[in-house]
Image (tube, rainbow, N blue to C red):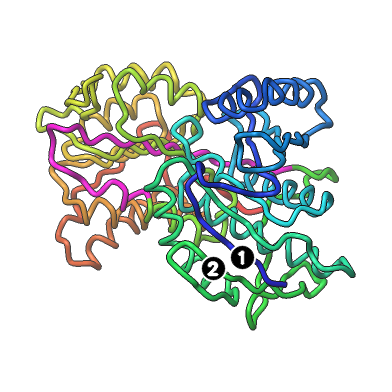
């Protein structure tokens, strides 16, 4: 089957159906605008969704005179925002496409759910998940159904122009990695050819077969089907306006790629928050309840890490204050990485309460910091222990002849880091 894929500005979307995300108890800006345009029709749909745990979507048909470009809305109930993962995103897209096929819609439009500051999914990985889910669902439908898919066009949209441009830029690479046959008409338009699946749990894309996106991993334990533990990684970044610019976007991109290429990639859920202010720190830790906390940014020679104040300027956080914070919110956190200059003293303060902490003994360059983090998380994603992952991070700096391999320091006062593994296999 052939599919026309477009990335577009949300304000220019015209489709038979538009997917609308909804998290329990929360109504965001887009939902408020849609509710106003439907004269309160969205609110009643949301109430119906939340009143029944067996309902996870609802169709709203719009009148011809509606100011919304789409003729129908498919409202998806995504549950609690703090529990929403990439696996849930894949499942939501698969469900929404299935419902659209059932109703016979031809043109559909979807946002890339989860890349807002409120949710914090990594943008490239979330967009990749959407494309993978689309390819798998259409391939599976083509294999099971004797009739052709009704859907001919899919628009992926966002309200922010820079995100639309980002989607356009990475679409070609993602489709190539999926080995999908495609033709690019412009920077934002692609024709995709999706072949039938093999019937063995795989789908054909291009000339080869590939495993479908693993929406949810499950394992058998003591005769019961259970989900394995998901490791939550919280990436916090701060680059105040009065400090030197750092390559923080490159760092999270490389960390995400390292996990994505690893054996246990589906066991790690990464959330990211940028321009972190001192008033945000507790909130992010409380909401996400992470297992690993990664801070990327500046540290001072006086051993403070630098967050932002309400004006975007530098706000130093002392070792004492940071140590106290982690002594209180240590329930789920097992590892902290302070990827900032002069953070070793901070790391020692945090290590009084957290099993494994990484800090930097002096100033460290962008390239070395990124290389260390990439190798460290790649190793964790393959099920290696923290000490091995740390050593591989340092070796990677040496392999790249950056001469900063002795700067990262691993502090573990409470356990042997060789005994700590986040993933032990299924």
Residue 91 image position (x, y, % from top left)? 70, 47
In the image, is residue 229 part of the stretch drawn in magenta?
yes
CA distance separating discs 2 and 1: 6 Å
The answer to whether residue 57 shows anywhere in this view is no
| Frontmost residue, 390 versus 192 | 192
Residue 50 in the figure: left or right of residue 15: right
- Packing grade of label 2 (10 A; few <14, some 14-19, many >=20) is many
Residue at the (44%, 52%) spot, across then down: 256
Quadrant of image for the N terminus: bottom right
Residue at the (54%, 68%) spot, across then down: 190
Q: Which residue is mark 1?
A: 4
Q: Which mark is residue 353?
A: none
Q: How many marks?
A: 2
Q: Which residue is mark 2?
A: 190
Q: Secondary structure at mark 2?
A: strand
Q: Secondary structure at mark 1?
A: strand
- Which residue is most to the left? 301
Residue at the (24%, 27%) spot, across then down: 307
Residue extent of the magenta highlight: 227-252
In the rendered view, tell whether residue 283 sits above or below residue 193. Answer: above
Residue 163 image position (x, y, % from top left)? 42, 48
Residue at the (24%, 29%) spot, across then down: 346
In the rendered view, tell whether residue 2 sits above or below residue 266. Answer: below
Q: Are marks 2 and 1 in contact (CB under 8 Å)?
A: yes
């Amino acid at each position: 089957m052939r599919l026309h894929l477009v990335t577009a500005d949300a304000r220019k979307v015209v489709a038979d159906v538009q997917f609308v995300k909804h998290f329990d108890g929360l109504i965001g800006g887009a939902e408020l605008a849609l509710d106003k345009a439907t004269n309160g029709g969205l609110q009643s749909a949301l109430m119906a969704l939340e009143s029944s745990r067996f309902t996870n979507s609802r169709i709203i048909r719009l009148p011809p005179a509606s100011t919304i470009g789409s003729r129908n809305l498919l409202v998806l109930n995504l549950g609690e925002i703090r529990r929403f993962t990439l696996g849930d995103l894949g499942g939501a897209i698969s469900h929404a496409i299935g419902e659209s096929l059932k109703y016979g819609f031809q043109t559909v439009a979807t946002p890339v759910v989860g890349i807002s500051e409120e949710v914090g999914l990594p943008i490239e990985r979330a967009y990749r998940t959407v494309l993978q889910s689309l390819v798998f669902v259409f391939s599976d439908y083509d294999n099971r159904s004797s009739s052709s898919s009704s859907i001919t066009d899919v628009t992926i949209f966002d309200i922010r122009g820079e995100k639309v441009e980002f989607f356009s830029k990475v679409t070609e690479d993602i489709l190539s990695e999926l080995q999908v046959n495609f033709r690019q008409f412009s920077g934002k338009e692609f024709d995709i050819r999706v072949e039938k699946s093999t019937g063995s749990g795989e789908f054909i894309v291009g000339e080869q077969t590939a495993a479908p996106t693993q929406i949810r991993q499950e394992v058998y334990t003591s005769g019961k089907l259970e989900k394995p533990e998901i490791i939550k990684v919280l990436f916090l970044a701060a680059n105040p306006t009065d400090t030197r610019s750092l390559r923080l976007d490159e760092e999270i991109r490389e960390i995400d790629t390292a996990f994505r290429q690893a054996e246990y990639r589906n066991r790690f859920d990464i959330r990211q928050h940028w321009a972190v202010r001192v008033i945000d720190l507790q909130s992010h830790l409380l909401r996400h309840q992470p297992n690993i906390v990664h801070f990327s940014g500046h540290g001072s020679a006086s051993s403070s890490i630098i967050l932002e104040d309400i004006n975007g300027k530098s706000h130093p956080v002392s070792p004492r204050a940071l140590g106290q914070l982690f002594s209180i919110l240590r329930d789920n956190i097992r590892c902290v990485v302070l990827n900032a200059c002069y953070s070793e003293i901070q790391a020692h303060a945090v290590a009084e309460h957290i099993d494994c902490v990484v800090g930097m003994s002096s100033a460290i360059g962008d390239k070395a910091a990124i290389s260390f983090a990439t190798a460290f998380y790649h190793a964790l994603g393959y099920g290696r222990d923290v000490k091995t992952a740390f050593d591989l991070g340092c070796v990677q700096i040496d392999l790249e002849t950056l001469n900063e391999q002795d700067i990262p320091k691993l502090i573990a006062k409470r356990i042997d880091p060789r005994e700590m593994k986040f993933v032990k296999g299924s």
